[in-house]
Image: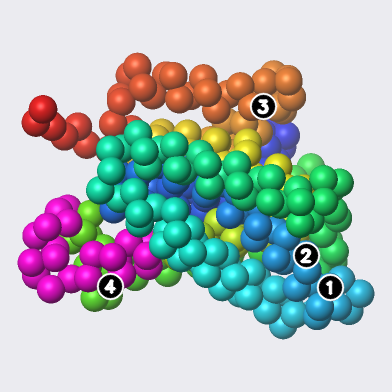
Amino acid sequence: MSEFLQQLINGVTLGCVYALIALGYTMVYGILRLINFAHGDVYMLGAFFGLYLSRIFHAGTDPNPLKAVLVLVLSMAACGLIGIVIERAAYLPVRKSPRLSALITAIGVSLLLENGGILVFGPDPKFFPQIVPASNIQLLPGVTISNQQVIILVVSLVLMVALRFVVLHTRVGKAMQAVSFNHTAASLMGISVNRIITFTFMIGSMLAAAAGVLVALQNPKIDPLMGIMPGLKAFVAAVLGGIGNIPGAVLGGLVMGIAEVMVVGYVSPTYRDAIAFVLLIVILLVRPAGILGRNVAEKV
């Protein structure tokens, strides 16, 4: 029983990271009906921004909570700006083009960020400084949780609740819902569709950056290609929960994280990446709209 609880804690922690990345996918899809394949690479940039900010603030040699918060917040802000640039420079010019053009553009932006990262940061892995010294907390006999896992859980929960509040209880959130429902009707009601789309990209990129920094706390080895597999898994998590559905993205991320850790713990680490695509195939066969998604009739 203790082993199961330990795996469950590890799975929920990993699932929170997937959920943060999946939220960016699902928000952009809800607004634009576009899969932003560059989103996983923004997660990578968040980790690297955190690395260099940690060096600037000497957060690794002289760690304290204020420096850790500064590294997280500034990394999110930097990736938020990156998200704005990506949307304005890459996606805005092809917004009225066929969906295939936008899809190819997304793949191109992803390749640009990956190869640009190799060029700028170098191909060799870098090691993220310990801006939060690790320690373990004993919950039950044989069940422990690290302070870094606690930070991941708490920060993820705070960001998810903040996003939920913004979407449901602010003017910009209600504008996002309106744009998601119908661009033309939202524009006729005086909503700046372009600004709302840019805001959505910014928020999604900030969440991905937070995930990158949080993962680097626990797994300090980072490299320019680190966003490929987590990005794919987070996309599967978004589809699993119901693409375009914010609570569904969170649920899908948690299911994905728990499933992956359980497979590693009870089956074999060899299948840790395969489980994501098994879940994707199953959900597409059984419930194509996702766990919390709704089947919508589309006129053709």
Element at label 3: loop
Relative depth, front residue between 188 and 206: 188
* Picture disc at residue 51: 2
- The residue to which callout 1 is attached is 55
Q: Residue at x 76, y 51 (%)?
A: 119
Residue tagged 3: 272
Bounds of the magenta segment: 181-200
Q: Is residue 159 magenta?
A: no
Q: Earlier in the sequence, mark 1 or mark 3?
A: 1
Say which quarter of the image contains residue 295. top left
Q: CA distance from mark 3 to mark 2?
A: 27 Å
Answer whether labels 3 and 2 touch (C-beta < 8 Å).
Answer: no
Q: Secondary structure at mark 2?
A: helix
Q: Which residue is depicted at the point 66% across and 45% down? A: 114
Residue lying at 40% horizontally and 38% vertically, measured from the top left? 103
- In the rendered image, residue 263, in percent from the top left (x then y), is placed at 65, 25
Q: Classify residue 215 as left or right of residue 37.
A: right
Report whether 201 appears left or right of 173. right
CA separation, marks 1 and 2?
7 Å
Q: Earlier in the sequence, mark 4 or mark 3?
A: 4
The residue labelled by disc 4 is 172
